[in-house]
Image: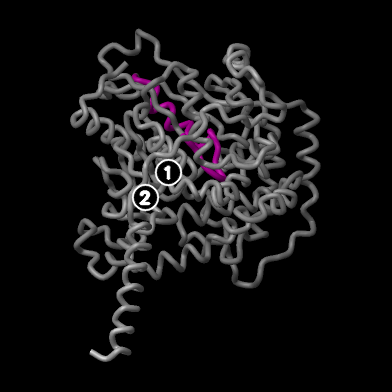
Amino acid sequence: MGVTVKILVLLLAIGGGLVYKNVSQLWADLPVPQLDPQQWWGDEAEPKDYAAYLANSSEVIGNRLSYPEKTIADLKSRLNRTLRLTPPLEGVAFEYGFNTDYLKEVVEYWRDDYLPRWREREVFLWQFNHFTTDIQGLRMHFLHLMVYDDNKVGKKHYPVLLLHGWPGSVREFYDLIHLLHQSNLDENNKYIFNVVVPSLPGYGWSQGTSRKGLGPAQVAVIMRNLMLRLGYNKFFIQGGDWGSIIGSNMATLYPDNVLGYHSNLCNNLSPKAMLKGFAAGFWPSLFVPSGFEDFFFPKSNELKYLMEESGYFHIQATKPDTIGAALTDNPVGLAAYILEKFSTWTNPSYRSLPDGGLTKRYKMDALLDNLMIYYLTNSITTSQRLYAEQYAQEQRDLHLERVPTPVPTGCARFKSDIMQFLDIQLQDKFTNLVHSTYHKQGGHFAALEVPKVLYQDFIEFVKKVERKFRIKSL
């Protein structure tokens, strides 16, 4: 063998070894990182005596939040200033974003029908018990529904934490809360739940932080501390959107506390999972139950959809305060920005409809309830900062997507959601994936759009966890 050939072989061997080493490092599972359970997020200085802070701040306070008439009157006056909206292009429905002709109709309904009934909507929103408590320096808001002894008879009883996302709120879960908490809705139902529904930090009535670094992993710490504060050492989790990521993080960081994790947007963005998804595209029939191939393939359709629908994501992950400033005290702009997501993320075909199909699957009052929470609490900017924190270097360095969790996991897929993951992609992250389902109807906001379907899916998951892991009810 000539000297040149030997050198070439040696270089290829060294290069191949380096590539293998780097790929294997990306491929390898990682241990669970340790996060500070007392990390301080409050505006004031961190207390020197944290034990004393806990003793003085652990009170859970019942709240009935209300807004004065002048606030509602000011909103109405702002909704009157819509004359300068630019008309849509000829023949364009929602393809360019929220159709401004229809936006005028929404604003008119909001101003002239919904707002005169605002006190009625307040009563609706406060139908559940609202509470606040201090967690790690932040005033956290949550709904908490407990089951009384008389209602437990003959029922299996568990706590469940429901986690919303953006641009949602606790309002998404109202119908699901009734199904989980009220045993008299179906005499054949054998389950009843204590239900906890927090507003994420910076969302709704939960305080946002003035400090950098509060990403989904740190929110998971806060949510776990909230559940411990309420006396729940073991509980189920259900979540979509950010709720799916935060719930996954809780199951990863604190598996001993989580009885089961159920999500309508299970995901795994590890390099290994991404490569498996790409490879599966060549032999889809091997990895997808018959009849559900169109949930995943062709991948070109999914990529096209994500490119079209992810503009908001890029700006919120890089410049959340810029778009936040544009939407603050701008109810018409806020309505267009938020409600457009309830159109295209519910069904991408609704982009071709002049009204975005908004009232095909939702009641306008429900959509406006959610919108009012963002407007009245002035939480649009603080809610969007979660995107920037997710992609900050400190958050990425945790590599939680590469840390497996043994917590029993259930994944409900809804056909029109913004992305889907195969079981072979999820099983590396969720080693006890015991429940995997497909629903032809439904999109990103399943709790609001198809609450009964989501409820039944969750109950089937709980049954499987009981059978396989022999868990005990309260």
Q: Where does residue 53 sit, x and y in percent of width and height?
A: 62, 16
Decide if residue 198 is on the left or right side of residue 240. right
Range shown magenta: 163-183
Q: Identify the residue at image location x=72%, y=53%.
A: 322
Dominant secondary-structure state across the stretch colored magenta: helix
Q: Secondary structure at mark 2?
A: strand
Count how many numbered circles sit on residues in the image. Answer: 2
Decide if residue 124 is on the left or right side of residue 474. right
Q: Is residue 301 above or below residue 455?
A: below
Q: Is residue 389 magenta?
A: no
Q: Quadrant of the C terminus?
A: top left
Q: Is residue 181 above or below residue 345?
A: above
- The residue sitting at the front extreme is 3
Q: Is residue 297 visible?
A: no
Q: Identify the residue at image location x=30%, y=61%.
A: 276
Amino acid on which disc 1 is placed: Ala
Q: Where does residue 364 sit, x and y in percent of width and height?
A: 57, 43
Q: Is residue 282 visible?
A: yes
Mark 2 lies on residue = 414
Q: Which mark is residue 446?
A: 1
Q: Identify the residue at image location x=50%, y=39%.
A: 217
Q: Is residue 38 above or below residue 331?
A: above
**Residue closest to the eye, 6 or 69:** 6
Q: Is residue 168 magenta?
A: yes
Q: Secondary structure at mark 1?
A: helix
Q: Are marks 2 and 1 in contact (CB under 8 Å)?
A: yes
